Image: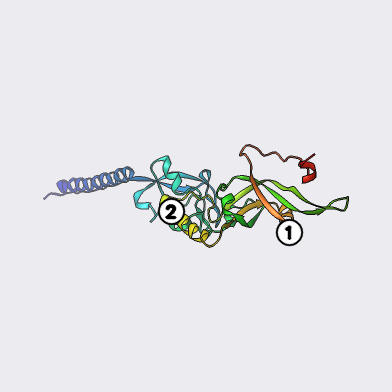
Amino acid sequence: MKKGIMLPLVVAILAAIVYAMIVSSAEKKLNASKNIQQVFVPIRDIKEREVIKRDYIKPVPVPAAYLQKDAFTYSTPADFKSIENAVARIQIPKGNQISKYAVTSLSPEAGLSSKIPVQMRGFVLTNVPIATASMIKPDDNVDILLTFEATMKSGQRQTVTVTLLQNVKVLGVGSDLGQGLDAKSASAMKSKEDDAAAYSDQTALSLSLSPRDAQYLALALAQSDGAVTVILRSHGDVTNYLMEVATFEKLFQ
């Protein structure tokens, strides 16, 4: 074969190979773009044991080839519920895919500290009657009353009631921290609490208090003859009212 014919033939073959490679690469990119999935990533660093809120995360598209194992995927807005109010087991950096291994459910096992606001304290009020606690839910607001024997100016001792604390946020009731359990988990938790109730008619309330209020509540509970009462407030009522000391003498005036 003449050189004049050989050279163009080689060039043509090389051009065909290059063209085939370009087409193949384009096809792979096209196929990859068709196999995109949405995953949840943090919009900021999420700290260890921090409760994940909806505005902390967003769905982003990633090729299926880069989808991490057990990552939380997004297809409808309802998928936010699968991760909202979960607790981070480890720190999750901004932009990283959130895997199921990295989070746990909001529960006593995750720790009450996950729900305590900054500069506040988690006060666990024990010996609360179940009949009272069953009507209270996490994130409700309550007032704390103290009834005790006091010596009046006249020297007489009377039973009085004072409103010790107002507008206190409830973090948890028993083992319910407001985690939004699925039906199976909720049933298991209720069964566990029913078993515990068979041995006791009391449970605990976890309250969010300032350090100062926590001191005064601890002081009130130290009164051996004092009784603490928890009363519910309306969600919309955040006013701290000026309350006078209640006595039987005033009651019958």
Question: Quadrant where the C terminus lies?
Answer: top right
Determine whether the residue tagged by mark 2 lies in a helix, strand or loop: helix
Q: What amino acid is found at the position of numbered circle 2 in the picture?
A: Ser
Q: Nearer the viewer, residue 72 or 165?
A: 165
Tell me the residue that label 2 is attached to. Answer: 187
Q: Quick one: label 1, few (<14), some, or many (20+) residues within 10 Å?
A: few
**Residue 131: horizontal and vertical position, in percent?**
57, 51
Asked whether, in this view, residue 195 is left or right of residue 168, the answer is left
Q: Nearer the viewer, residue 131 or 99?
A: 131
- Residue at the spot 29% in from the left edge and 45% down from the top edge: 31
Tell me the residue that label 1 is attached to. Answer: 225
Can residue 245 be seen at all in this image of the molecule? no
Can residue 238 be seen at all in this image of the molecule? yes
Label 2, label 1: how far apart the Cα atoms are: 38 Å
Q: Nearer the viewer, residue 120 or 52?
A: 120
- Residue at the spot 23% in from the left edge and 46% down from the top edge: 20
Determine whether the residue tagged by mark 1 lies in a helix, strand or loop: loop
**Residue 75: horizontal and vertical position, in percent?**
38, 42
- Residue at the spot 64% in from the left edge and 41% down from the top edge: 233
* Precedes in sequence: disc 2 or disc 1: 2
**Which disc is residue 35 wearing?**
none
Q: Are marks 2 and 1 in contact (CB under 8 Å)?
A: no
